[in-house]
Image (cartoon, rainbow, N blue to C red):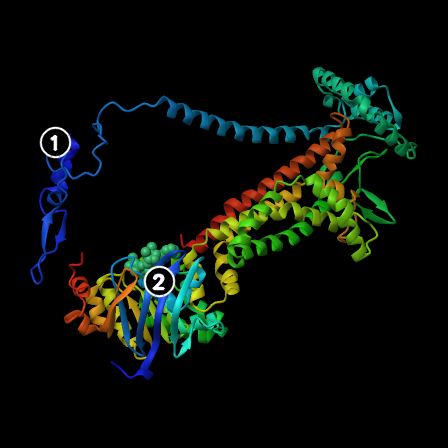
C-alpha cells in the first residue's frame, strides 16, 4: 500500500449506533489522498452510515452515538474544537437520493459559493458554468439556468447535485451511489468525471454496481452487517479476495 | 378462476419472470422459472400456484357490481353536509349584504318603532322627524307592513334594556337639538368623503348618534388598518421566527413542549387577551412611551398579535416541516450553517405556506372584535400616530349593534361595515389561495 503520509481519511475502531441499534462495528480503515475508494456491500450493511460519518452528517439525526475516531488530515473530526461547518465545506457529499433545492438550476449551483461569501456576479457565473461542465450537465441546461431544478429529470438532478458539490471546492468527495438513477451514457460520463476528479480530490464512492466499482476505484471496502469484512486494492478484491464472503459478493452469488 | 390462468399465461409460464439462480463457482448463472421456485402447495388447485395470498378471491370483471349501502349513504351524507355548509356561508353573507340596504333607504320603520316605544329623548324625536322628511323625498322606501310589525315586536322585546342608553344618548344629543336632525340615507359620498369641518379643516367623522349623524367609514377603516398593521408586524416576524426556531434549532424535548403550548394559545378566549391588554399591557406601554391615551392602536395591536401569533405559527410550522429533510441536509452538507439553511433553503421552500399564514393572520386581526373593543380606546379618528386611540370596523359593530334602532340608517350602515369586513377577508384569502400561492408553487416546485 501507499506511504502513510498519503493517508487522507483514517478511522479507528469506529462504532455507530442509531439509538440502541448498532449500525457500524469497529471500522478501521485508511483511505488515500487522490485515490478513489469504493464502498460495496449488500443493502442495509451500513455504507451510507459510514459515508455520513465522514462529514458528520449523522449529527443531524436524533439519537446517534459514535465511538472510536475518524481523522482527516490528522485531525480528529469528532473533536470538540472542530468546526463542523468548515469540515463539511472540505468534505462534500452527493446523496443517494438526488436532492436539489426548490430553486433555479443556477441558484442551486451558486448556493454553496454564496453561503461562503462569494457575491460577485461574474465569479458566480464562472463557477456555475465550470461546475456544470464538470458534471457533464452544462450542454443540457445552459438554456434553462433560470428554470426550477425540480423540473429536471432524475439523472439531470443527480448530476446537478454533483455540480453543486464541486462548486464549493471540497478536498474530499463522498458520493452515495451517484449513478444509481442514470442511464449508461450519463453513468459513463460520471465515471470519467470521477477519474478526472481524483487528480484533485480524494473520493469515496458507494456503489451497488460491481463493474463500476472495478472500473473507477483504486481501493475497495466490502461491508457486511455493519462490519468491514475486507479492504484492499480493487484488483485484489475482485480477483483474489481473502474472505469467502467477499468473493461470493463480488461474483454475484451472495447468499 | 380466469384470473389465475391469465397470470400463468402472462408471467409464470416460461422464463418471462425469472430470477438468476446461483450455482457452483465458475458456472454460468441460469434463470429458473418463477413458479417452480415458489412452488407452494395450493389447497384449491393442488398445483404450484405462487400467490402468497390464497384467501382473496376475485369476482369476474363483468359481473354484478357490488353495492354497499353504508358506503353509498355515507357518500351522500358527506356531500349534503358539505353543500349545506357552503350554502350557509353564502347565506350569511347574503343576509349581511341585504341588511345593509337600510343604510341607503333610511329609517322608514323607525317611525312606528319610536312611536311604539314611547318617544323617548330627543334622539328618537329626531329620528321620527327624519323619517318624516324621508317620506316626502322617497315615499316608496316605506317597508312592507309585516316588516314594520316585526320591527315593532323586536323593539318591544329589547326596548327595556335599551332605556338607560337611550336616556344617556338623549342627554348627549340634546345639546345640538336646535339644528334640525335627520336620518337621511347615506350615500357613498357621505361614507367616504370628509363630512365635517373643524378648525377649517375637512374631517372624517363617525358620529352615528347625533342630531346630524355622521357616518364616515374612513376613521374606522384607518383604525382597523392601523391595529391590523401593528398586530401583524409584531405577529408575523415573531411567529415565523418561532416556527423557524422550532423546526431547525430547538432540541426535540423543547419542540415537544413548545409546539402544543403555542397551539393551545390559538384557542385562548380573546376576551382574556383583551382584558390582559386593557389592564397590564396598556400600563406598561404608557410607562414606556408616555402616550397620552392609555388605550391606543399600539396596545390593541399587541393584543391582536397575541391572538394571531398562534395561528401564523401553526400554519408556518406545518409548512416548514413539510420541507423535505433531504433539502436541509443538502444545504448543511455544502457547508451552510444551520441559520443559513433555515433562512435560504427552508423558508423559501415553504414560502407559499408562510404567505398563506400571514394572510390568514391579517384576516383574523382585521375581523377580531373583542380585543379591539377592549384595548384600542374606541375613538374614531383619522391619524397615523399609533399612540392615539382608534376604533376599528369590527369593534364598531360590536359596540353599536346591540343598541341600534332596527332597520334605521345606522343599522344599515353597521351591516354595510359587516359586508366590507366580509369582502375584505374573503378577498384576502382568495388572493392568498388562488393568485399568489399558485404562482409561488409554480416557481418553487418547477411545475
Ligand atoms: N436514521 C436511521 N435511524 C435508524 N436506523 C437507521 C437510520 N439510517 C440507517 N439505519 C439503519 O442502519 C443500517 C445501515 O443503513 P445504511 O443506510 O447505512 O445502509 P446502506 O448500506 O447504505 O444500504 P443501501 O445500500 O440500501 O443504501 C440499516 O439497518 C438501517 O436500517
Ligand atoms: Mg445507502
Mark 1 lies within 8 Å of ligand 1 (Cβ measured)? no
In x, y percent, where is residue A84? 46, 70
The residue that disc 1 covers is B45
Out of A2 and A131, give the one closest to the viewer.
A2
In x, y percent, where is residue B342? 51, 60
Mark 2 lies within 8 Å of ligand 1 (Cβ measured)? yes
Out of B82 and A240, give the one closest to the viewer.
A240
User: Where is residue A33, by image quadrant?
Assistant: bottom left
Residue B117 to residue B184: above or below: above
Give me the chain letter of mark 2: A
Out of A73 and B384, give the one closest to the viewer.
A73
Residue B28 lies left or right of residue B349; in this view the side is left
The answer to whether residue B369 is visible is no
Q: CA distance from mark 1 to mark 2?
A: 47 Å
Q: Which mark is residue A49?
A: 2
Q: Residue at point 65% right, 39% down?
A: B421
- The N terminus of chain B - image quarter: top left
Amino acid at each position: 500500500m501507499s506511504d502513510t503520509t498519503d493517508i487522507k481519511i483514517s478511522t479507528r475502531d469506529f462504532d455507530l449506533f442509531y439509538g440502541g441499534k448498532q449500525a457500524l462495528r469497529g471500522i478501521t480503515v485508511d483511505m488515500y489522498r487522490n485515490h478513489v475508494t469504493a464502498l460495496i456491500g449488500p443493502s442495509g450493511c451500513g455504507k451510507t452510515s459510514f459515508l455520513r460519518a465522514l462529514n458528520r452528517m449523522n449529527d443531524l439525526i436524533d439519537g446517534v452515538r459514535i465511538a472510536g475516531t475518524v481523522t482527516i488530515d490528522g485531525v480528529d473530526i469528532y473533536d470538540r474544537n472542530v468546526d463542523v461547518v468548515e469540515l463539511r465545506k472540505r468534505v462534500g457529499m452527493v446523496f443517494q437520493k438526488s436532492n436539489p433545492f426548490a430553486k433555479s438550476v443556477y441558484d442551486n449551483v451558486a448556493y454553496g459559493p454564496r453561503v461562503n461569501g462569494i457575491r460577485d456576479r461574474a465569479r458566480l457565473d464562472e463557477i456555475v458554468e465550470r461546475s456544470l461542465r464538470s458534471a457533464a450537465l452544462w450542454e443540457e441546461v445552459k438554456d434553462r439556468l433560470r428554470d426550477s431544478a425540480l423540473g429536471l429529470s432524475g439523472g439531470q438532478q443527480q448530476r446537478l447535485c454533483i455540480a453543486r458539490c464541486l462548486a464549493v471546492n471540497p478536498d474530499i468527495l463522498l458520493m452515495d451511489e451517484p449513478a444509481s438513477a442514470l442511464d449508461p451514457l450519463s453513468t459513463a460520463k460520471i465515471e470519467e468525471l470521477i477519474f478526472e476528479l481524483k487528480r484533485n480530490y480524494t473520493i469515496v464512492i458507494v456503489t451497488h454496481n460491481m463493474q463500476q466499482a472495478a472500473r473507477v476505484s483504486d481501493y475497495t471496502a466490502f461491508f457486511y452487517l455493519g462490519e468491514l469484512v475486507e479492504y484492499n486494492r480493487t484488483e485484489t478484491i475482485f480477483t483474489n479476495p481473502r474472505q469467502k464472503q467477499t468473493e461470493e459478493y463480488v461474483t454475484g452469488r451472495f447468499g | 378462476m380466469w384470473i389465475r390462468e391469465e397470470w400463468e399465461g402472462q408471467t409464470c409460464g416460461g422464463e418471462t419472470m425469472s430470477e438468476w439462480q446461483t450455482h457452483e463457482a465458475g458456472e454460468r448463472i441460469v434463470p429458473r422459472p418463477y413458479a417452480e421456485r415458489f412452488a407452494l402447495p395450493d389447497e384449491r388447485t393442488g398445483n404450484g400456484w405462487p400467490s402468497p395470498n390464497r384467501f382473496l378471491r376475485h369476482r369476474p370483471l363483468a359481473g354484478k357490481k357490488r353495492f354497499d349501502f353504508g358506503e353509498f349513504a355515507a357518500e351522500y351524507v358527506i356531500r349534503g353536509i358539505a353543500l349545506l355548509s357552503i350554502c350557509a356561508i353564502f347565506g350569511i353573507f347574503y343576509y349581511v349584504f341585504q341588511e345593509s340596504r337600510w343604510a341607503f333607504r333610511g329609517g322608514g320603520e323607525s317611525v312606528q318603532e319610536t312611536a311604539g316605544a314611547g318617544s323617548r329623548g330627543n334622539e328618537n324625536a329626531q329620528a321620527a322627524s327624519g323619517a318624516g322628511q324621508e317620506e316626502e323625498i322617497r315615499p316608496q322606501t316605506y317597508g312592507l307592513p309585516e316588516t314594520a310589525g316585526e320591527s315593532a315586536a323586536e323593539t318591544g322585546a329589547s326596548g327595556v334594556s335599551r332605556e338607560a342608553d337611550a336616556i344617556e344618548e338623549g342627554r348627549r344629543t340634546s345639546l345640538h337639538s336646535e339644528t334640525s336632525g335627520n336620518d337621511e340615507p347615506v350615500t357613498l359620498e357621505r361614507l367616504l368623503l370628509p363630512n365635517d369641518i373643524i378648525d377649517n379643516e375637512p374631517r372624517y367623522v363617525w358620529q352615528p348618534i347625533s342630531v346630524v349623524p355622521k357616518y364616515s367609514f374612513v376613521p374606522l377603516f384607518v383604525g382597523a388598518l392601523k391595529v391590523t398593521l401593528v398586530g401583524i408586524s409584531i405577529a408575523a416576524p415573531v411567529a415565523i421566527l418561532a416556527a423557524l426556531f422550532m423546526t431547525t434549532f430547538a432540541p426535540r424535548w423543547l419542540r415537544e413542549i413548545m409546539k402544543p403550548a403555542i397551539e393551545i394559545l390559538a384557542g385562548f378566549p380573546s376576551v382574556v387577551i383583551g382584558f390582559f391588554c386593557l389592564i397590564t399591557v396598556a400600563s406598561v406601554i404608557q410607562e414606556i412611551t408616555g402616550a397620552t391615551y392609555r388605550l391606543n392602536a399600539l396596545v390593541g395591536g399587541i393584543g391582536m398579535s397575541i391572538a394571531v401569533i398562534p395561528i401564523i405559527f401553526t400554519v408556518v410550522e406545518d409548512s416548514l416541516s413539510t420541507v423535505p429533510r433531504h433539502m436541509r441536509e443538502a444545504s448543511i452538507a455544502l457547508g451552510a450553517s444551520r441559520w443559513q439553511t433555515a433562512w435560504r433553503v427552508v423558508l423559501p421552500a415553504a414560502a407559499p405556506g408562510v404567505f398563506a399564514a400571514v394572510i390568514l393572520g391579517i384576516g383574523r386581526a382585521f375581523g377580531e372584535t373583542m380585543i379591539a373593543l377592549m384595548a384600542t380606546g374606541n375613538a374614531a379618528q383619522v391619524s397615523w400616530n399609533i399612540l392615539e386611540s382608534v376604533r376599528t370596523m369590527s369593534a364598531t359593530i360590536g359596540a353599536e349593534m346591540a343598541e341600534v334602532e332596527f332597520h334605521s340608517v345606522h343599522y344599515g350602515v353597521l351591516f354595510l361595515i359587516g359586508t366590507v369586513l366580509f369582502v375584505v377577508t374573503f378577498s384576502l384569502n382568495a388572493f392568498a389561495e388562488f393568485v399568489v400561492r399558485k404562482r409561488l408553487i409554480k416557481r418553487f416546485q418547477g411545475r
